[in-house]
Amino acid sequence: MLRSTRNAWLLTAIGSVAFATSAGLGMSNMDYRPGAFLWGISASGWSCLGFPMLIAIGFVSTMPFNWLAMRGAPAFAIVTAAACYGLLFLFAASNSTPTARVTWALGQPIPRRAALLAVRQHDTFNDGYFVHAKLSMPKSDLDEIVDSCSYRPSITSDRFAQLFPNDRFPEIGSSEDDEYMGQIGYRDATAIMFYNSNSQLLYVSRHSREPKP
């Protein structure tokens, strides 16, 4: 079946698109709210610009399957290709969910009592990408997160006031402003967090110039 040129090119085309789609999903942006269609996923700038390159890499990835087909094992080639590209897509999808992105931003699994209210991811071309999230959780869960990671106290509400303009954050008034100076905020090398104890809302933002693990 796949010994024909037509079927060989069909497998090549399907495999190339499957590879590029899976890779693009892993690099996708997100603007998630509960009930958002497809988690609010959208194509990132890098995935759009790099799509021809991803297609080319996908083309190369189909060569072993075409080689198997030309050696007289077309059925095995089809099954193997379907399994490989299917697993690749599932891996990309599982690492692109709102839960997976927030887990990466927090640096650990999301507490079971927490609820995701908003997740945003966007790339900046030259400065890597950012993941911002808003969660509802009790203060005890925040304490566990801070204790298990290398976060240190810090004033961080200014950054989140820009990211979530419809939410209320402490405003700087003077050096004696207890709400601003006494805010519950933390940071590490690439992430910042702010916790609103009145509404039990946690805001987190992480930046990276490297691919997600």
Image (cartoon, rainbow, N blue to C red):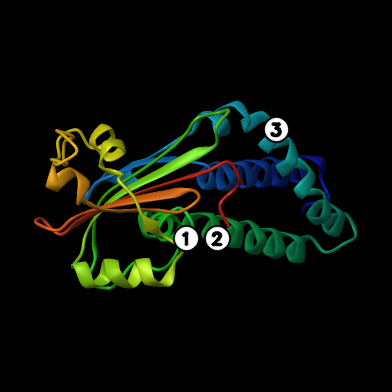
Q: Which residue is mark 3?
A: 53
Q: Residue at x 15, y 59 (%)?
A: 200
Q: Quadrant of residue 48?
A: top right
Secondary structure of the residue carrying numbered label 1 = helix
Q: Position of residue 123 (x, y in %)?
A: 49, 34
Relative to the observer, which residue lies in front, 105 or 115? 105
Q: Which residue is mark 1?
A: 94
Whichever of callouts 1 and 3 sits on the residue coming sooner in the sequence is 3
**Tag shown at residue 91:** 2
The vertical placement of 197 against 44, above or below, is: below
Task: Name the amino acid type tagged 1.
Answer: Ser
Task: Name the amino acid type tagged 3.
Answer: Met
Q: Residue at x 49, y 57 (%)?
A: 95
Q: Residues within 10 Å of mark 1 (few under 14, many from 20)?
A: some
2 and 1 marks in contact (CB < 8 Å)? yes
Q: Position of residue 158 (x, y in %)?
A: 27, 36
Secondary structure of the residue carrying numbered label 3 = helix
Relative to the observer, which residue lies in front, 116 or 144? 144
The vertical placement of 36 against 106, above or below, is: above
Task: Name the amino acid type tagged 2.
Answer: Phe
